[in-house]
Image (cartoon, rainbow, N blue to C red):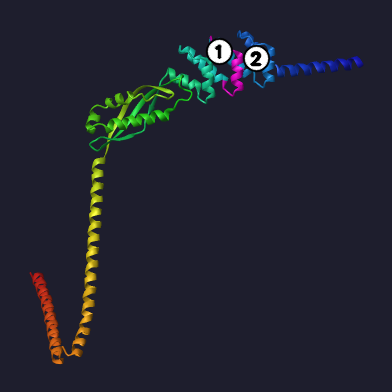
Amino acid sequence: MNSTIGMIIILALVVTFLALFFSFVPLGLWISALAAGVKVSIGNMVGMRLRRVVPKKIVRPLIKATKAGIKVNINELEAHYLAGGNVDRVVDALIAAHRAEFKLPFERAAAIDLAGRDVLDAVKMSVNPKVIETPSISAVAKDGIELLTKARVTVRANLERLIGGAGEATVLARVGEGVVTTVGSAQSHKEVLENPDKISQTVLSKGLDAGTAFEILSIDIADIDIGRNIGAQLQSLQAEADKNIAQAKAEERRAMAVAKEQEMRAGLVEAEAEIPKAIAAALKDGNLGVMDYYDMENVISDTKMRQSISKTGSQEKIIRDDNSKIKK
């Protein structure tokens, strides 16, 4: 009875040990690597577990690289994984570069991946260039006509400058600047419409890919449309501004004239206010007699009556003329 219990305990311990062993040691992965001709020891896989590295994320890319004929060190793969890189994507990029027959060292591919770039897409772009279409670029020729230009830029990834190089936005901005400069230096917009290839040749000769992660292969003008007549609009705006300035100056002169007139009328009223005082002083001093004063008042009254009759006559004449026009 005791021996039976002992055998059961031993068997349970063996089963537990084997379960822990196979859960800790990826035996199936080791067999797959051995069948693929990749030498990876069980001790190395146990070490990966202890270093908190998932063995399948190292061994499977290693098998893939070995089958593709690429020599990769397992320690380099593990170090790249511990640095936070994507081992599988780096190996795929190395295989793509190997198939395209251009050299891409593992260190360069790992550095591109750690820099946050998609190294596989970069290799694909190096093999198959990418076409970037610019938005509509507004440029004005010297004759004042606006041209709306769209360009297609064919670029290829430059793996040597992919780390720290500027992206697509910089390339598009430089192309736009070159288009604006080229169109702006043309004497007439007709010159640009006749020779659109002049834009691409001039822009391409400026070396716009310097300091970028791309190599510009060609710049092709896709479309040119005639926009607004900027020169005429500017002249119209200038004429409107000149008119407003002239009106403001005329209004200023009119206001000054009105102010001067009011000032003169105030002086006249002030002078007329002194007349009764002067008459009173003359009467008091005996320089003016009473009869002389009455004669002067009669002259003034007669003058006012004549002015009133003259105004009334003018108004009646105007009314008669209007009536005669209506009858006709």
Q: Residues within 10 Å of mark 1 (few under 14, many from 20)?
A: some
Q: Which residue is mark 1?
A: 65
Measured as percent of width and height from the top left, residue 144 is found at 24, 38
Residue at the front extreme of this rendering: 285
Q: Secondary structure at mark 1?
A: helix
**Nearer to us in this view, 252 or 166:** 252
**Nearer to us in this view, 137 or 25:** 137
Above or below — where is 143 with respect to 301? above
Residue visible at 11% across and 75% down?
314
Q: Secondary structure at mark 2?
A: helix
Measured as percent of width and height from the top left, residue 266 is found at 24, 74
Using the rendered view, name the quadrant where residue 145 is placed.
top left
Q: From which residue to which does the magenta span run?
A: 69-86
The stretch drawn in magenta includes residue 71: yes
Mark 2, mark 1: which one is toward the viewer? 1
Tell me the tag on residue 38.
none
Mark 2: amino acid: Leu
For the C terminus, give its image quadrant.
Answer: bottom left
Mark 1: amino acid: Ala
Residue visible at 54% across and 23% down?
114
Using the rendered view, name the quadrant where residue 54 is placed.
top right
Is 28 left, or right, of 124 in this rendering?
A: right
Q: Which residue is mark 2?
A: 29
Is 296 left, or right, of 90 in this rendering?
A: left
